């Protein structure tokens, strides 16, 4: 019987040094039981996002090896970047795939979190479905104030870690480890240098401020590109399709006299999310995803294999 498969999307606080990025990613290459699907780094965010799929044991081993490389090379006391962070290995979310359910993911996240702390000394916070405290389900709560605030506040009862002592690793900070459904990281870049406008738009669309359901959003200054960005996480693509989110941001931007320059998808994305948006943009009537040749061939190959 095949072992269950999980996706894992570790995020590291490094997006500028190619040699460090390669050292972090190298443990995922050519390893039995783990497949490196995608990795990309952004110098403005100063962040590396890696997409993996694999079996539980192999994922844990490769993640720990990668974490050691990150912890050895990243010092948050000297780190700057637009993306919020509390750790060199900032977040490690697990997502259930074939043969796995969310309770399996929760068990894997908690098992890995305990081992991660034991082998690295980095304190761990559990979030989303793996959270041990209801108020820590939302990652933004765990990461409030970032590394700098956590350095002075970690001893307070409400900020103490779930695993490990109530003190940060001096250079590597803390790590948030979670279990969650599939998430789409969708960035929308605006033709402006005005970060205040991007903040207004992010506030207007994110669920926590009364905006769109299943949408998280922050503003980012893309200094190297002369743009500002609305960086978005979509936690349910059925309730917040890509095209709906983009249309809302375009509307908010035009109200302020600016335009959307481009969009980015960070990491992996389900085909359905892109197909739905393409069908909407092309105004296709009665379109069926089974009309997509490659998807139909994959379906046929799966039927023959079974």
Image (cartoon, rainbow, N blue to C red):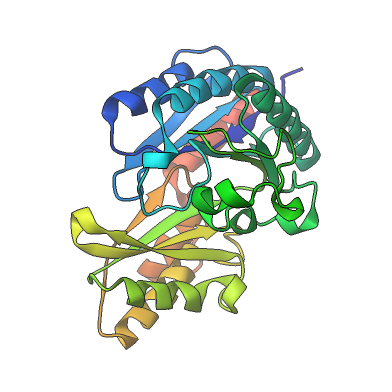
- Locate residue 149 relative to residue 223 in the image: left or right: right
Residue 205 in sight here: yes
- Locate residue 170 relative to residue 108 in the image: left or right: left
Residue 216 to residue 1: above or below:
below
- Locate residue 133 relative to residue 171 in the image: left or right: right
- Locate residue 61 relative to residue 191 in the image: left or right: right
Image coordinates of residue 108 in percent, x first then y, are 73, 30
Numbered label tally: 0
Image coordinates of residue 138 in percent, x first then y, are 66, 57
Q: Which residue is drawn at 76% across and 52% down?
A: 157
Image coordinates of residue 283 in percent, x first then y, are 40, 71
Q: Residue at x 29, y 65 (%)?
A: 228
Residue 104 to residue 240: above or below:
above
**Residue 54, picture quadrant:** top right
**Residue 218, picture quadrant:** bottom left
Image coordinates of residue 64 in percent, x first then y, are 57, 21
- Judging depth in this view, the residue of 230 and 250 nearest the camera is 230
Residue 278 to residue 197: above or below:
above
Residue 48 in sight here: no
- Judging depth in this view, the residue of 80 and 39 nearest the camera is 80
**Residue 4, picture quadrant:** top right
- Judging depth in this view, the residue of 76 and 17 nearest the camera is 76
Task: Report the quarter where the N terminus lies.
Answer: top right
């Amino acid at each position: 019987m095949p072992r269950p498969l999980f996706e894992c999307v570790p995020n590291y606080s490094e997006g500028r040094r190619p040699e460090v990025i390669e050292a972090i990613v190298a443990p995922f290459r050519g390893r039995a039981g783990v497949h490196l699907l995608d990795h990309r780094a952004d110098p403005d965010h100063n962040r590396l996002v890696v997409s993996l799929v694999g079996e539980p044991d192999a994922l844990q081993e490769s993640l720990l090896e990668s974490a050691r490389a990150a912890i050895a090379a990243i010092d948050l006391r000297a780190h700057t970047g637009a993306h919020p962070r509390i750790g060199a290995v900032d977040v490690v979310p697990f997502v259930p795939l074939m043969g796995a359910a969310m309770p399996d993911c929760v068990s894997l996240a908690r098992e890995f979190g305990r081992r991660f702390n034991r082998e690295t000394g980095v304190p761990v916070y559990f979030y989303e479905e793996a959270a041990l405290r209801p108020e820590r389900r939302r990652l933004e709560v765990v990461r409030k104030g970032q590394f700098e605030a956590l350095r002075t506040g970690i001893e307070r009862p409400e900020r103490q870690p779930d695993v490990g002592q109530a003190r940060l690793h001096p250079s590597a900070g803390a790590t948030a480890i979670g279990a969650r459904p599939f998430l789409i990281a969708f960035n929308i870049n605006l033709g402006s240098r005005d970060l205040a406008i991007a903040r207004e738009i992010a506030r207007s669309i994110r669920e926590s401020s009364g905006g769109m359901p299943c949408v998280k959003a922050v503003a980012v200054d893309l200094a190297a590109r002369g743009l500002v960005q609305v960086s978005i996480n979509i936690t349910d693509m059925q309730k917040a399709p890509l095209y709906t989110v983009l249309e809302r941001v375009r509307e908010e931007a035009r109200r302020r006299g600016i335009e959307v320059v481009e969009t980015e998808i960070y990491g992996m994305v389900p085909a359905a999310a892109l197909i739905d948006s393409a069908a909407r943009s092309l105004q296709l009537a009665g379109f069926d995803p089974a009309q997509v040749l490659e998807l139909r061939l994959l379906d046929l190959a799966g039927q023959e294999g079974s």
